[in-house]
Structure formats: structure tokens, C-alpha cells
Amino acid sequence: MRDSPSALRFAELGSFLAARRAEVTPEQVGLPGGGSRRLPGLRREEVAMLAGIGASWYAWIEQGRAKNVSLEILKAIARALRLNEVEFQYMARLAGYTVADRSQGPMGDDDDRRLAAGVVDSFLPKPAYFVNRYWDIVAANRSAARLLGLEGANHNYLESLFLDPLAPGRFADWEAVATEAVAHFRTRSGEFLGDPRLAALTQYLRECSPAFADLWDRHRFSDGTQAGLVLLHPDLGRVRLSQICLDFTARPGLQLFLLEPQSGVMNERIARWGP
């Protein structure tokens, strides 16, 4: 029987905590190091002690068995594991303290797509594109499509990034771009655990791309505010862009990415870019 969305969220919460616990050394939190440790990082009972909760209760949380964890306990665990704000917000959402409004599904019908296309085209010649909760490219203007290799129909940003053999050559630092993309996608996907297509997409990428599988298993998180992006294009050369990501509360998971050339000269070159 398929697990419920809440069971999946609590299982993910436990997996997340275990991953973060493995990265915190005793010395970082003022505990004596050394000795024999079967695994790196803190032990469960050490996290429980630092958070001021019972060891058994913390173990239940990590095992996905605790269904009524208070926000105060989550904050104490976050302090013990030295989590940043993005990671804490992700943890809180998994525990049920920030529930996404699912009254509307991901953008998909023809009217939605026409509206999205009009929005991104209004930013020309600057690149702009929309993704939905699965990171399908809902709409991309001409500049974004040509710069990011998104010409044609039915593109998924993550599939293009990890499965297109030409993708690594489009970025000056593909590894940094890929790391940020997975961290951002993982942060947002926590709101939609239990979605069958989301699970299928993640599994497909894990099976087809060892790089994606490795990054996914690191449990990194990002709010999507990475400042810069450097593209390598055969016509334009090295293109430095600032990136802005905007959310739309009426459509959970929908994001608009705006790319601003950092050079006025490059902006003019993109505007004059011929076929």
C-alpha cells in the first residue's frame, strides 16, 4: 500500500536529520572528540542531549515515527545541528508547520501557458522562463531558450541539465549550477511529497544520472537566491548573468526565473542576436 503524504514527509524529515547529523563533528558543538566512532558525525543521543530532549524521542523522530513534534523541539534540534534558516524552514514544512495551498494544481492548461508566454516575452531581450513544481519549462522567451538550450517543446530543466550531453558545455561551472539546482529543487519539492509524478521524476533522474543521485543524497537545500550564472555560448561567448527567482502563491510550485546580463554591452548583443 502506498505511503500517505504525511508518512513520506516524516520519513524525509528523518532522512534529512540523519544526513545533517553525520556532518556535524563533536568538536563543532563543544563535545569531546576522538575515540572509536562507527560512523562520522554526532550520535543520536548526543543530538538529543544538545537539544534537551529524550534520546528515545529523538530516535523516533529520525525513524519517521514521531507525528506530533512541536515547533520548539524542531528549533532545539536545528540549533543542535547548526542548521541555517533555509534548512530549518524545510524541516518545519516536513513536520507540517507550513502547508502549501494545493487548491490549484501546477500550471498546465492552454490559457495558463499563453499567459506565461506573454509574461516572459515582456522581459525580452532579457532571458526569462517559468518552471512548475516538476521543473517543467512552462514558458521560456526566445533569449532564455537559445541561451539555455531549451528550443523545442516539452523540456524539463533538470532533465536538460543532467541528461543532455551538451549541458556541461553550456556553463562555465556546471558542477556549481547542478549543485544549486538540486538543492533548490529539493527544498521546494518537500511541499509536494507524495505527488506520484514528482516521485517518478526523482527516481528517473537518480537512475539515469549518477551526478543527480549523488547530489540528491547529500540533502542540500537552497532558497534559490544564487546571485550569478556564467554561460558559455558559441555565438556570444562568455555571458555573465544575475538570476532572480520569483514565486507565485496562487500556483504552488510555480517559479519565474529572470536572468539579467551583467554587462550592458552583452544586453545589447542579446537584443541584436540574429537567427
Image: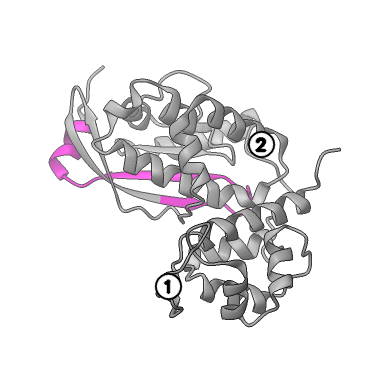
Q: Along the line of sight, which residue is nearer the eye, 73 or 26? A: 26
Q: Does the magenta stretch include residue 17?
A: no
Residue 263 % position (x, y):
16, 45
Q: Residue 102 in the image: state x and y as whole percent.
A: 72, 50
273 lies above or below 227: above
Q: Which residue is drawn at 33% across and 39% down?
A: 175
Locate residue 80 relative to residue 15 in the image: left or right. Answer: left
Residue at 50% over, 32% down = 137
Q: Of 91 and 110, which appears nearest the observer?
A: 91
Q: What element carries label 1?
A: loop
Count of numbered labels shown in the rendering: 2
Is residue 248 inside the magenta stretch?
Answer: yes
Asked if residue 39 is positioned above or below residue 114 in the image, the reply reads below
Q: How crowded is mark 1: few (under 14 residues within 10 Å), some or many (20 or more)?
A: few
Label 2 and label 1: CA atoms lie apart by: 39 Å
Q: Looking at the picture, tell me which residue is in the foreground, 75 or 222.
A: 75
Q: Where is residue 149 in the image (x, y as percent from the top left)?
A: 36, 24
Q: Which amino acid does label 2 sit on?
A: Ala
Q: Which mark is residue 199?
A: 2
Tell me the quarter of the picture where residue 129 sits.
top left
Q: Residue 241 carries which label?
A: none
Residue ranking furthest to the bottom: 52
Local crowd at mark 2 within 10 Å, few (<14), some, or many (≥20)?
A: some
User: Which residues make up the magenta segment?
Assistant: 245-271
- Specify whether 71 is left or right of 165: right
Q: In what element is the residue under mark 2?
A: helix
